[in-house]
Amino acid sequence: MASNDSKVWFVTGASSGLGRAVVEYTLARGESVVATLRKPQALDDLVSKYPATQLLVLPLDVISPPAITAAFSAAIAKFGRIDVVYNNAGFAEIAEVEGTPDADARYVFEVNFWGATNVSREAVRVFRDVNAPRGGRLLQVSSVVGLKATPGMGFYSSTKHALEGISQALASELDPAWGISITLLEPGLFGTRAIVTDGGMHAHPVHPSYTAPGLPAAAMREFLAGPGREVGGNPDKAARAIYEIARTEGVGQRVPLGLDAIAGIEAQLEAIRKDLEEARKWSVDLK
């Protein structure tokens, strides 16, 4: 049942994985959802289950700024406001940095960085200039690889690093009076379509210089093709956590999701601390 403070959610990349899990969990809690995706028919089962007064499904390819604006406008026309934007659309390129064609590398940035950034800008505008009263929550789906890059996923990792940077800058620019908060979600591995069926991942052939056994990129490929399909966290439980995060005040700017994400980020922080201490000698006499 809907609560007295029922919210309107706007979700990108809603076809599968954490996007669909969040849509399903939020609808089950009685809240209104605008679910956007490139192929709306993927949610036909939900359309038949939930009334049009609660669920609006819209086509959206986030690489198109006019399409983003149109989707937000349709959402406002339907529900009058948007309270939570779950900025989730994205995919991964699996390849060594040397083995990733330029066109593919640029396209993953078009989706994961520019698409997410343009959704973010429109979300802030709506939260500030449309919502009455002002305010809203922007949940950015980054990744543990946004802080600790992964071999074999260099360009995907780089898009998430870039999303971390633009989100931190955007959050620092906002006027607190607008009532807008931005949270970077940093999931570890979850049993979503990206792992289970490769639908969210595009794998390239191994670069010939990286075929030697034991190289990190090769190990990552083997992991994603084998045990990585089985060890990921539960998307439904992640959706529950994301829902609660959206409704909790005072959440930190970054929220790792999964003990593997926390462990990976802790390892990265420790490596940075070590580098800082070892580099201090180079900076003490620079004035």
Image: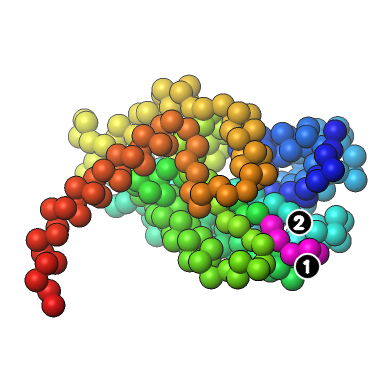
The percent position of residue 177, horizontal first and vertical second, equals 65, 68
The percent position of residue 33, horizontal first and vertical second, equals 78, 46
Around disc 2, counting alpha carbons within 10 Å, would you say few (fewer than 14), some (14 to 19), or many (20 or more)?
A: many
The percent position of residue 231, horizontal first and vertical second, equals 46, 23
The percent position of residue 212, horizontal first and vertical second, equals 20, 34
What mark, if any, has residue 130 been given in the picture?
Answer: 1
Name the residue at 47% across, 41% down: 256
Can residue 208 be seen in this snapshot?
Answer: no
Name the residue at 19% across, 47% down: 274
Q: Could you say whether the residue bearing mark 1 is in a helix, strand or loop?
A: helix
In the image: residue 130, left or right of residue 173: right
Name the residue at 51% across, 66% down: 172
Q: Is residue 132 magenta?
A: yes
Quick check: 115 above or below 185? Answer: below
Work out how far the residue at label 1 is from the one at label 2, CA to CA, in angstroms. Answer: 9 Å
The residue carrying mark 2 is: 82
Q: Nearer the viewer, residue 205 or 225?
A: 225
Q: Could you say whether the residue bearing mark 2 is in a helix, strand or loop?
A: loop
Quarter of the figure with residue 244: top right
Quick check: 210 above or below 38? Answer: above
Q: Main secondary structure of the magenta part?
A: loop
Specify start and end residues of the magenta stretch as a single range. Answer: 130-136
What mark, if any, has residue 115 been given in the picture?
Answer: none
Quarter of the figure with residue 138: bottom right
Q: Amino acid at mark 1?
A: Val
